[in-house]
Image: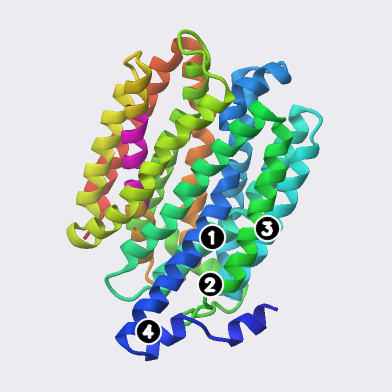
């Protein structure tokens, strides 16, 4: 079936040889496909965040234990991403993306059958193993197929899809847990994932500029080459810190807002993630800015926004906290657009394996972001989490200033 779809040679091939009008139309088609891909993937990843206070009561577990439903898929992404990158460099882009999306559908549904916290964590981990086959390969696809000067804006479209998906998953979870049962969440999310995988198979053009890396030796050689590249290593560390901030803040803010004086329930906590939608506006803008002012300046501005937003959450006023989370999300999405775009620039070739390593470091940061702040939460509450997260952000500025080149 993939062969039939790719034989039609849609959109992107027309862009290579057609008129300016066809090129514009084909690029729009690619942007739509990448938006759908990002959305259908990220509707899964952080879906349990607004359910954490409820899981704490249902499973009689600590904040750190229930947060494993967030960190398990994130760490699975980090573990699987390098291998997926190597596989995609050998097999191609679209085939791996669609297969991974279909695979993600199964553990999503099975998570609804979990009878205890350990089973739920297992199915969440299995979900995470499929996700790198989508995100790492999509990043390589964008770097290779985007016309010169449009990588930033194309990557921003994909990231916008992940923003909308991330919000939608959390919002759906909050509604389902309030009006039905938490298990219904995974049934609904599974249906969305299946629909998204079919839409991606239909809409996403096949790669036209993909160069196959033949043999395991060549793939491993490219992996070693990436790990010796100072610009890539700095980018991987920046990615680690970016998601560390995002996951850490949006995991433990749920406990902060579920306790006194706020006492928010699952639906209200899910609605808090509406702040993610600002990313749907900001990320495309950041892509345009990125193409104009460069990577380092964009990153500096974005990190400053993150720091300002996190500091605002210390003010014990719900509207101010929401404003702070909005600012922090805005900065994170801009950082992600800059760092993920820089991977292709720094790698040069074998971009899928380079993207796979980036995804591994990025989601390693997310995994630790849902665990390590818990140690500070137990000692100093939300203030301790904020202090730790802010210290991590200083590293981003230093690394970008030393290693990145526009």
Q: As drawn, is 28 to the left or to the right of 125?
A: left
For disc 2, the marked residue is 204
Tell me the tag on residue 22: 4
Q: Are marks 2 and 1 in contact (CB under 8 Å)?
A: yes
For disc 1, the marked residue is 37
Earlier along the polypeptide chain: callout 3 or callout 1? 1
Earlier along the polypeptide chain: callout 2 or callout 1? 1
Residue 66: quarter of image: top right
Q: Which residues lie in the magenta part?
A: 324-336
Residue 248 placement (x, y as % from top left): 46, 30
Earlier along the polypeptide chain: callout 1 or callout 4? 4
Earlier along the polypeptide chain: callout 4 or callout 2? 4
Q: Nearer the viewer, mark 4 or mark 2?
A: 4
Q: Main secondary structure of the magenta part?
A: helix
Residue 211 can be seen, yes or no? yes
Q: CA distance from mark 2 to mark 3?
A: 15 Å
Q: Is residue 151 above or below residue 187?
A: below
Q: Nearer the viewer, mark 1 or mark 4?
A: 4
Outermost residue to the top? 260
Q: Which quadrant: the C terminus?
A: bottom left
Earlier along the polypeptide chain: callout 2 or callout 3? 3
Whether 125 is among the magenta residues is no
Which element type, helix, strand or loop, lies under badge 2? loop
Q: Is residue 121 above or below residue 146?
A: above
Residue 255 placement (x, y as % from top left): 52, 19
For disc 3, the marked residue is 194
Which element type, helix, strand or loop, lies under badge 4? helix
């Amino acid at each position: 079936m993939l062969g039939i779809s790719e034989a039609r040679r849609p959109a992107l091939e027309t862009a290579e040889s057609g008129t300016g009008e066809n090129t514009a139309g084909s690029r729009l088609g690619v942007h739509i496909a990448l938006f759908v891909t990002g959305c259908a993937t990220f509707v899964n990843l952080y879906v349990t965040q607004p359910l954490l206070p409820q899981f704490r009561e249902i499973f009689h577990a600590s904040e750190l234990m229930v947060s494993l439903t967030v960190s398990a898929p994130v760490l699975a992404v980090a573990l699987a991403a390098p291998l997926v990158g190597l596989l995609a460099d050998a097999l191609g882009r679209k085939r791996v993306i669609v297969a991974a999306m279909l695979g993600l559908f199964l553990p999503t549904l099975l998570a609804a059958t979990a009878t205890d916290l350990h089973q739920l964590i297992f199915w969440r981990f299995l979900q995470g193993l499929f996700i790198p086959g989508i995100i790492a390969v999509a990043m390589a696809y964008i770097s290779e197929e985007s016309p010169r000067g449009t990588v930033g804006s194309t990557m921003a479209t994909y990231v916008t899809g992940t923003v909308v998906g991330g919000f939608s998953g959390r919002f759906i979870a909050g509604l389902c847990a309030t009006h039905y049962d938490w298990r219904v969440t995974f049934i609904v999310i599974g249906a969305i994932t299946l629909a998204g995988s079919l839409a991606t198979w239909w809409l996403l053009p096949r790669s036209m500029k993909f160069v196959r890396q033949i043999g395991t030796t060549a793939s491993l050689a490219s992996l070693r080459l990436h790990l010796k590249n100072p610009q890539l290593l700095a980018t991987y560390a920046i990615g680690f810190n970016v998601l560390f901030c995002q996951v850490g803040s949006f995991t433990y803010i749920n406990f902060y807002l579920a306790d006194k004086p706020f006492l928010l329930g699952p639906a209200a906590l899910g609605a808090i993630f509406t702040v993610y939608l600002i990313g749907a506006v900001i990320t495309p803008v950041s892509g345009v800015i990125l193409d104009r002012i460069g990577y380092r300046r964009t990153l500096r501005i974005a990190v400053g926004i993150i720091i300002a937003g996190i500091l605002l959450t210390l003010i014990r006023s719900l509207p101010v906290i929401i404003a702070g989370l909005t600012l922090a999300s805005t900065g994170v999405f801009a950082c992600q657009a800059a760092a993920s775009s820089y991977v292709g620039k720094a790698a040069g070739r074998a971009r899928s394996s380079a993207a796979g390593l980036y995804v591994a470091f990025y989601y390693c940061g997310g995994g630790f972001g849902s665990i390590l702040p818990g140690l500070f939460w137990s000692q100093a509450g939300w203030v301790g989490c904020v202090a730790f997260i802010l210290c991590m952000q200083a590293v981003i500025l230093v690394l970008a200033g030393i290693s990145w080149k526009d």
